[in-house]
Image: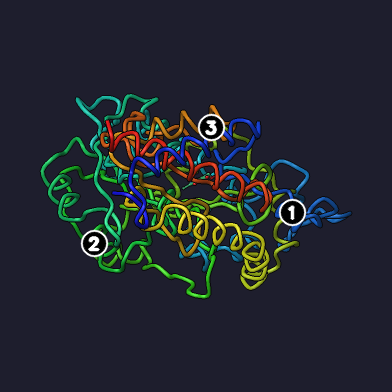
Amino acid sequence: MASRGVSIDEDLESARHDYEALVRQGVSLDLTRGKLDPLQLDLSGDLLALPGDRYLSADGVDCRNYGGPPQGLRELREIFSGLLQVPVDQLVASGNSSLELMHDCVVHALLGTVPGAKGRWVDEERVAFLCPVPGYDRHFSLTERFGIEMISVPMTPEGPDMDMVERLVAADAGIKGIWCVPKYSNPDGTCYSDETVRRLAAMPAAAPDFRIFWDNAYAAHHLTDDEIEIADVLAACADAGHPDRAFVFGSTSKVTWAGAGVAFFGSSAANVSWLLGHSAKRSIGPDKVNQLRHALFLRDAEGVRAQMRRQRELLAPKFEAVDRILTERLGGTGLATWSAPKGGYFIALNVPDGCAREVVRRAAEAGIALTKAGATHPYGDDPRDRTIRIAPSYPGLAELEQAIEGLAVCVRLVGHERELA
Ligand code: PLP
């Protein structure tokens, strides 16, 4: 399809011209990762001076020493309990990365025995995870690293295709888990509907030890006034008679500092003691000073919300800029569709089938680094080769605009070349 009354030939010609100009500019721009802009990191600058000369937690634990509650500091867990929809006694505050906790849960399930399991996953003939696509590349590389088979399930506007999930999980005892980013999902910003959460919690599973890996990485990360709330998965699982089904993960990586935050795990009492039992073998305990520093800085749940409003002020204009430029340059061309997330860190750009890799290659040649095409799918293989993940958070606004202008040129070039091939 040609855009706005211009023939495809003419549009291709002008895209070639624009691309040559882009290459001549010699830009060096990076849209690969959901890193925080230094201005966002500065919002938490007070952390550098905290906890000051204080080292006792509210309940008198000397945070400098060994010991203290293996679940992490209670005052910090109290702050995040409501935001992550996990009762405070079932919430663990841990190290700085929730991905690490997901990794540990997989490893302990492989080498230990999760509540309800007949044995270790590693002794099973086959272990598979459902992977809603497009999804988060690090979930997929973690699963792949342990030889766990990945089965793609398409996303719908309400979450994973639940008819397919229910059918697969009911029939196949080898399916032990599903990756879920239930709110403002990476990369397309999907939020799971209440009905999706209910069905995930209630569906019959052939594997008695089936687990939902509920990665609520963007629980408080709104970009608009329409602050989405999702259903409480732990409560839904308990109500459905599957109290041990969900592992909930979250972190302050995109609340305070991505490299020095606090990660959380929440689940049933049985799962929490299972994880803590194994964690006690691998660690003497979490960094309690960092937990204290975070509790003092954030103060309470309202403190987190206020912090996230400040983050939104910096982030929302970037998401708006991406949407505006894509609309101006690609709207009505038939060459692209993209998500308009109400929160989170990413935008999913869909180009014509068979074009994503070539768009990413051309962009790289022009100095614009994008996440590898295919990264949004298990094994790095997007069968339609069409989804590109855009991470707008790190570059400054002017650089971001330049990068998206350049990306739009690459989409026009590759899209029209394909149309005329
Ligand atoms: N989960 C999702 C869905 C993410 O997008 C990211 C980072 O981009 C993470 C987890 C990483 O979290 P953490 O920094 O707590 O390991």
**What's the coloring here?**
rainbow
Q: Nearer the viewer, residue 185 or 56?
A: 185
> What residue is rendered at 27% in x and 42% in y?
130
Q: Which residue is mark 1?
A: 39
Q: Secondary structure at mark 2?
A: loop
Q: Which mark is residue 241?
A: 2
Instruction: Tell whether 164 sits left or right of 309.
Output: left
- The answer to whether residue 361 is above or below residue 273 is above
Q: In this rendering, which labeled residue sits more in front, label 2 or label 1? A: 1
> Horizontal and vertical percent for residue 136?
42, 42
Residue 105 x/y as whole percent: 42, 39
Check disc 3 and report the residue beneath it: 281
Q: Is disc 1 in contact with disc 3, using a CB cutoff of under 8 Å?
A: no
Q: Looking at the picture, which amino acid does disc 3 mark?
A: Lys
Q: Quadrant of residue 406?
A: top right
Identify residue type, mark 2.
Gly
Would you place residue 66 above or below residue 59 in this image?
above
Q: Earlier in the sequence, mark 2 or mark 3?
A: 2
Residue 420 location, quadrant: top left
Q: Of marks 1 and 3, which one's residue comes earlier in the chain?
A: 1
